[in-house]
Image (cartoon, rainbow, N blue to C red):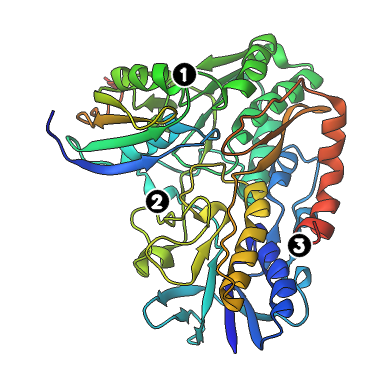
Amino acid sequence: MNKVVVLGAGTGGTIVTNKLWKKLKKTKQPFELTIVDKTFKHVYQPGFLFTMFNRDKTENIMKDARKLVPKGVKKVMAGVIRIDTENKIIYLDNNETLEYDYVVLATGARIAPERVDWWDDSIHQFYTPEGAEKLYNAITQFEGGKILIAIGDLPYRCPPAPLEAAFLLDDYFRKKKMRDKVDIKFCSPLNRAFSIETVNTVVQPLFKKKDIELETYFNVEDVDTEEKVIYSLEGSDDDYDLLILVPPHAAQPYIVESGIAEGAGWVPTDKQTLEVKGQENMWALGDTTDIPTSKAGSTAHYEAPIIAKNIYNKIINNGKVDMYDGHVQCFFLTEFGKSLFIDFNYENPPKPGKPARHWWWFKQIFKPFYFNLVATGKV
Amino acid sequence: MSYQIAKTVDAVGSFCPGPLMELVRAVKEAETGSVIELLSSDKGSVGEIPKWCEKAGHELLEVVDVDDKVKSYRIKVGEKKKRRRRNKE
């Protein structure tokens, strides 16, 4: 009996479970496929950019992950405490244990404000359902002043998201006829607005056109929320009235507890085979890896089939190893009604074109497409 | 030049978030005086890595060609700047 366990039921976890189910059936060998998740609440995270403007509701961007995977998959609702990698045993917080022959780490990234000593509740973020809803209230009550957007720590999920937030805030206050009362400033950790040069050539001129102030080389070092001042690692500081930060992120604590990774717990992962370095029969995908690419659902989407194939390859012992080529696709919203489309891999940078209405509409119809076809592993 | 590399950051093929972001992240977690190696195939790194090191107070020890695409940037982590909260007096 081949025991395969997937830890986490987010984007990577549900897709890889669906793909594995199909592949394991093909081996014609007995198997048990188990998915483990603390809550089985599956969140379509790109929806936060809409819930923060009340253009979507939190309940509409969440699904029960157990309904996204095949019936024959064993579902265990529990958190992971530790993996005994030597004996291949997973210890769960419901006092149960799970033995495995093959395990996939898909437990994503969590918000980890405890990683800095300056974070408090007056700082806004839109990386959780509650954070996005709270930010909506703050935006609607904002009567004017300076909104500052910056990256609280690295790495973080969805590199375009804070820039998209800046563009949407600009549009929101223009539509509200109070843009002249609102200064919007974006602080970039780099020497330009966005990390990918080819995309930046489109995005940075738009900042100028939309009167969004840009400060470069600003890596957040400290925030004085009493005085409303933010400080950078590079030595500059700035005032604000409303502060929106990408919060510090970390992987799940069990990864460090199990000796798989150190520090924030990003799993050392081979960027092509997706095998966890130094471990046997263990793979990782999505936000939890240390692969130098976007922490985004799209990354997990294109990684999942590679892991399913590689586990299949191992089980049938065909000597093959499939490779992930770094493929990622995403939308990049530039206003309510327009978006860029980005497509790249390890070898080829994106050629984003111009912001277009059709990409905006693709993004709108993507959510049902995501729940019905992507998360279920059909595409 | 004699030094020991404490950590290698492989950012080859990284477009998003990109080599500089990977370097900043590694530097934030590193000890003062330790040496970090950044592997990058991004042509933009040639200009932006030295610029950021200078601005953030780290020393770029040398840049070594690994092959015709990949360069190895060796960075000595400078003293972390003390917090400069404004004087409230």
Q: Position of residue A330 (x, y in %)?
A: 70, 38
Disc 3 element = loop
Q: Marks 1 and 2: which is nearer the front?
A: 1
Q: Residue at 46%, 37% (x, y): give it.
A: B12
Q: Report the Cα–Cα distance between label 3 and label 2.
A: 35 Å
Disc 3 sits on a residue from what chain? Answer: A
Q: Which mark is residue A114?
A: 2
In the image shown, does A86 or A91 lie closer to the viewer? A86
Disc 1 element = loop
Amino acid type at image mark 1 = Asn
Q: Residue at 79%, 49% (x, y): give it.
A: A57
What is the crowding at mark 2: few (fewer than 14 residues within 10 Å), some, or many (at least 20)? few
| Position above or below: A204 against A114 | above
In the image shown, does B50 or A156 lie closer to the viewer? B50
Q: Residue at 76%, 53% (x, y): give it.
A: A61
- Left or right: A275 as drawn, with respect to A41: left
Both marks 1 and 2 on one chain: yes
Q: Which mark is residue A191?
A: 1
Amino acid type at image mark 2 = Glu
Q: Which residue is mark 3?
A: A377
Q: Are marks 1 and 3 in contact (CB under 8 Å)?
A: no
| Position above or below: B10 against A109 | above
